[in-house]
Image (spheres, rainbow, N blue to C red):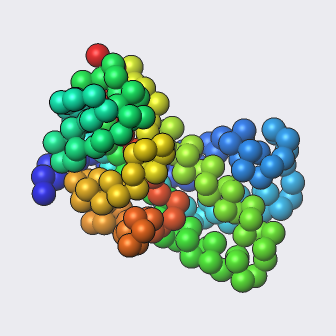
């Protein structure tokens, strides 16, 4: 496994502003809505969250229509192919908010369904917000297309495996995969983000 080209981005909990629109959508509330429960859950989450991202910059080859070859994996996907239509390079990334978030959610599932629901929504919005934060750091002025993750459209979840192997997701981020290709910690993301020509 080639690891010398893997870069890492870390962020403290207070460096990443949770997108309130994303949070409102996940909670099913009006934009900008807040409450004592939400703020209490946010404070607890911020104490356990640990943002980390690993990424590489790779060439993108398109040997035939609807096929993208990244060197470490070859993907047949019409949606991914269209997403990367104007790209010869891409960033492959894996991100997590850490296993302590999973433990907090497991604890709240037993203690309080309301706190569990709110904290789960906060944690989901938080990892998406961290993804935006990491993207802004790695792109550094480059023009990029929106990130695209396994599990969307016809980009199969099975590609989580070569993704995490290439990025050393287990060693560097502590991410493991289930037999159904679901990640632990749960609040983790893998994605390809094309760099425009």
Q: Nearer the viewer, residue 161 or 174?
A: 161
Please name whichever residue, 193 or 95, is drawn nearer the observer in this view of the structure: 193
**Position of residue 17 measured from the top left corner of the image (x, y, whole percent):** 62, 42
Looking at the picture, how far across and down is residue 53, in whole percent?
38, 50
Q: Quadrant of residue 139?
A: top left
Q: Looking at the rendering, which quadrant does residue 181 occupy?
A: bottom left
Q: Whole-percent x and y of residue 42?
A: 71, 58
Q: Is residue 144 visible?
A: yes
Q: Nearer the viewer, residue 149 or 47?
A: 149
Horizontal side of residue 80 vs 59, given as left or right: right
The number of numbered discs placed on residues in the rendered structure image is 0
Observer-nearest of 155 and 23: 155
Indicate whether 38 appears above or below 132. Answer: below
Image position of 144 (left or right of 29): left
Residue drawn at (81%, 38%) of the image: 31
Compared across the picture, whether 187 is left or right of 147 comes to right
The structure residue drawn at horizontal position 38% and vertical position 73%, both measured from the top left corner, is 179
Task: Specify the farthest residue to the bottom.
Answer: 110
Quadrant housing the C terminus: top left
Instruction: Please tell me which residue is depicted at 27% across the width and 28% down the height of the picture.
Output: 65
Residue 137 visible, this orientation: no
The relative height of residue 28 versus residue 67 in the rendered view (above or below) is below
Please give the name of the residue rendered at 44% of the width and 65% of the height, measured from the top-left corner.
Answer: 183
Check the picture and name the quadrant holding the N terminus. bottom left
Question: Measured from the top left, where is residue 119 in percent x and y?
Answer: 70, 63
Seen as rendered, the residue at the extreme top is 197
Q: Residue furthest front?
A: 65
């Amino acid at each position: 496994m080639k690891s010398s080209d893997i870069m890492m981005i870390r962020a403290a909990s207070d460096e990443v502003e949770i997108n309130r629109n994303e949070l409102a959508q996940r909670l099913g509330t009006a934009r900008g809505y807040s409450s004592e429960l939400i703020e209490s859950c946010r404070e607890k989450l911020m104490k356990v969250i640990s943002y980390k991202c690993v990424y590489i910059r790779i060439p993108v080859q398109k040997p035939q229509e609807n096929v993208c070859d990244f060197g470490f994996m070859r993907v047949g996907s019409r949606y991914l192919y269209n997403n990367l239509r104007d790209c010869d390079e891409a960033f492959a990334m894996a991100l997590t908010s850490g296993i302590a978030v999973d433990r907090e959610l497991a604890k709240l599932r037993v203690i309080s369904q309301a706190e569990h629901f709110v904290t789960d929504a906060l944690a989901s919005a938080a990892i998406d917000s961290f993804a935006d934060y990491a993207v802004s750091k790695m792109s550094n002025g480059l023009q990029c297309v929106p990130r695209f993750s396994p599990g969307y459209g016809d980009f199969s979840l099975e590609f989580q495996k070569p993704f995490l192997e290439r990025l050393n997701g287990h060693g560097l981020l502590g991410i493991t995969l289930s037999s159904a290709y679901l990640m632990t910690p749960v609040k983790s993301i893998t994605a390809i983000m094309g760099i425009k020509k």
